[in-house]
Amino acid sequence: LVKHSNGYGIYTAIATNGVLLSKERCRDLRSVGVEYLQISLDGATPETHDTFRGVPGMFERTVQGIKNAVAEGFFVNVATTVTHHNLREVPKIIDLCESLGVKWFMMYNFIPTGRGRFIIENDLSPQEREELLQFLWERLKKSKVNLLSTAPQFARVALQIEGANCTKIPTHFLNSDLPDKLRSLSDFIGGCGAGRFYIAMNPNGDITPCVFFPMVVGNIFKDDLETLWTDLREFTELRMRDTLKEHCGVCEYRYVCGGCRARAYGYFGDYSSPDPGCILNRESYNGILNKYSLTYQNKNLESLKEKVY
């Protein structure tokens, strides 16, 4: 498959749990043109990672897979979906990434889709997410690893911390090693890119705005992709920040953030709704708490603050 896609000039990246990345398999993947591997790591300890994965021994196998990938010369991105289970371990996960020699650490937003719908009580509160993004921005200044996040609020946090001194706006694909023109492109795009500069395609051909956004808007075997991209109402609306509901639609940071549209859809069934994970959307977040009868205690924040401030 990789050879076939490379023949069409398609850049192939692979997301994996890393457990099957033996030295031999890494060599095979490199030989057919794979350059980028995203490897999921859910904790800094075997206890945390293996508990989340549900299989003993996964942590050691994943870390070995990361080592093999780095040694073979892949561009390695370690991805962690941060929840209440591993929030306290984020600094140590970054320490581990630095020691392993990976290029990126990506903090993934929790999104209530798929099996995630059944564990929404593990989602971070807006205050926890705010503190985490502030930590990531400060840690980025001295880290050996590029720190990124799929939370579009990361751009707002950076702007609020740096003010007029902010020379670059972080996005979840920002690479400080890119040429200036590409860095400018990442600044221009800003925020949630679902249906704006990328889409997702399932094996059966179904097209969705992003991999975490289970709203099927067409099928590659039945519809013309260019027509969908240019004329589809849903894509047009996803590109319009001024029509977002509640605070997201009037926020001064809507053009660099805009909230996660998959989270809005997951929680409210409406991609124009506010992202309840933002500190500026407290009312929406309180509505989620009432809807699901949840109470969150922000017990994990001090360990993050002590690492940075």
Image (spheres, rainbow, N blue to C red):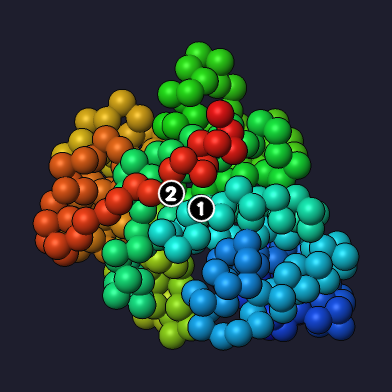
**Residue 292 point in image, percent of width and height:** 16, 64
Q: Which of marks 2 and 1 precedes in the sequence?
A: 1
Can you tell which quarter of the image residue 195 is in? bottom left
Left or right of 9 on screen, residue 279: left
Q: Amino acid at mark 2?
A: Asn
Give the structural element (helix, strand or loop) at label 2. Answer: loop
Q: Residue at x 17, y 56 (%)?
A: 289
Q: Is the residue marked by circle 2 packed among few (<14), some (14-19), or many (20+) residues within 10 Å? A: some
Residue 100 in the figure: left or right of residue 137: right
* Distance between mark 1 and mark 2 Cα atoms: 6 Å
Q: Is residue 5 above or below residue 98?
A: below
Vertical placement of residue 253 versus 276, above or below:
above
Q: Which residue is mark 2?
A: 300
161 relative position to 73: left or right: left
Q: Residues within 10 Å of mark 1 (few under 14, many from 20)?
A: many
Which one is in front, 54 or 243? Answer: 54
Helix, strand or loop status at disc 1: helix
Q: Quadrant of the C terminus?
A: top right
Residue drawn at (71%, 76%) of the image = 60
Amino acid type of the residue that numbered disc 1 sits on in the rendered structure: Arg
Residue 84 in view of the camera: yes
Q: Are marks 1 and 2 in contact (CB under 8 Å)?
A: yes
Residue 146 at x, y percent in the picture? 67, 44
Which residue is labeled 1 in the image?
88
Asked if one can make out residue 226 in the rendered structure from this viewpoint, the answer is no
Rendering coords of residue 120 (x, y %)? 30, 66
Residue at the image point whose x is 56% and y is 85% from the top: 55
